[in-house]
Amino acid sequence: MGNKTVVVIGAVNMDICGRPDKAPRMKDSNPGTVSFSPGGVGRNIAHNLCLLDIDVKFIAAIGDDVYGDSVYESCVRLGMDMHLSRCMSGGRTSSYLYVTDENGDMLVGVSDTDISASITPEYLKAHIKEINAADAVVIDANLTRETVAWIAENVTAPLYADPVSAAKAERLRPALSKLTAFKPNEFEAKSMTNETTSLFAAEALLREGVKKVFVSLGSDGIVAAEGSEIIKLPCETTEIVNCTGCGDAATAAIIWAGVNGLGIVESASAAMKAAAMCAACSETINSELCPELIS
């Protein structure tokens, strides 16, 4: 039997990270390191899925600029099928600039992902047969609300979603009742539901029609819910080097578990193992991630 195929529809960015050598001083220049790497929620999930032996078809909008050339080539090298992605003449490839503290925890980020609006219902309609042939489809909230609504109505494959941020999460509301699984973090879940706890938020999202809800709680672990079953798992013990990308790794693990028929306990466990591997790595993606290490 061949590998499972997942279509990921979302953003690819050039990530630009600034990390000071010492505790940062606000409103001042801080000595440190600045690094460039391909990123974006959709792209990071796709990268993790490739490491988990999933065949990935990635649909993103990319500008015809230096950043665009770099991120496109990196996706191809990883084994992603990019033939459905859209290259925009004169477009500005998405970029994400963030600054961490001296320990690698993010302090603030600025996201420039307007080009993702070029992934329109009209564009996806031309490829819907190939999209629906996948074992799963993943969307991120960098897409417009209109595109999300169209996907919810027209995609028949199991649908997964990542909210990206609390500010963008509302774009996913038209799709909630069609989602096979959804993994917000605690802040995003509470923001979407106006609930005061992660448990109440998970229950509220189930009432919205989401089949499986996974609420990541940072160092406190994860809440997973399906039907009347609600569990909480702790984090895996690990040395934290860099928390950026942990949520994307966890989402990819949940998708991997879902397409392989695993339940919420196994899915949540895989998510925690993948997140821990990411946290122990200085990069946004841990290249050692594999199915054997999260099973």
Image (cartoon, rainbow, N blue to C red):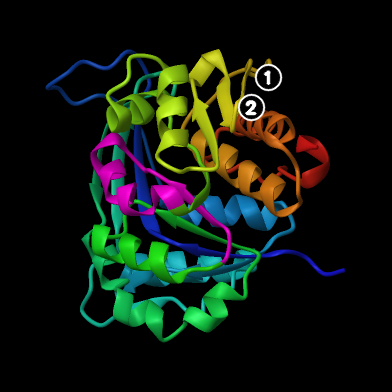
Residue 84 magenta: no
Left or right of 98 in this view: 239: right
Position in image of residue 212 (x %, y %): 56, 39
- The residue that label 2 is drawn on is 276
Q: Secondary structure at mark 2?
A: helix
Left or right of 130 in this view: 146: left
Q: Secondary structure at mark 1?
A: loop
Residue in view at x 43 percent, y 71 percent: 154
Question: From where the camera sits, is residue 37 visible?
Answer: no
**Rendering quarter of residue 11:** bottom left
Between 227 and 44, the residue placed more toward the observer is: 227
Of pointers 2 and 1, the one earlier in the residue sequence: 1
Q: Quadrant of the C terminus?
A: top right
Left or right of 25 in this view: 240: right
Residue that lies at the very extreme toward the left in this rendered image? 27
Please say if 255 is above or below 151. above
* Mark 2 residue crowding within 10 angstroms, few (<14) / some (14–19) / many (20+): many
Amino acid type, label 1: Glu
Q: Quadrant of the N terminus?
A: bottom right
Q: Which residues are magenta?
A: 157-177
Please say if 147 is above or below 87. above
How many numbered discs, if any?
2
- The residue that label 1 is drawn on is 236
Please say if 59 is above or below 197. below
Residue 160 magenta: yes
Residue in view at x 20 percent, y 79 percent: 90
Position in image of residue 15 (x %, y %): 37, 48
| Marks 2 and 1 close (CB-CB < 8 Å) | yes
Q: Distance between the Cα atoms at labels 2 and 1?
A: 6 Å
Amino acid type, label 2: Ala
Position in image of residue 143 (x %, y %): 31, 59
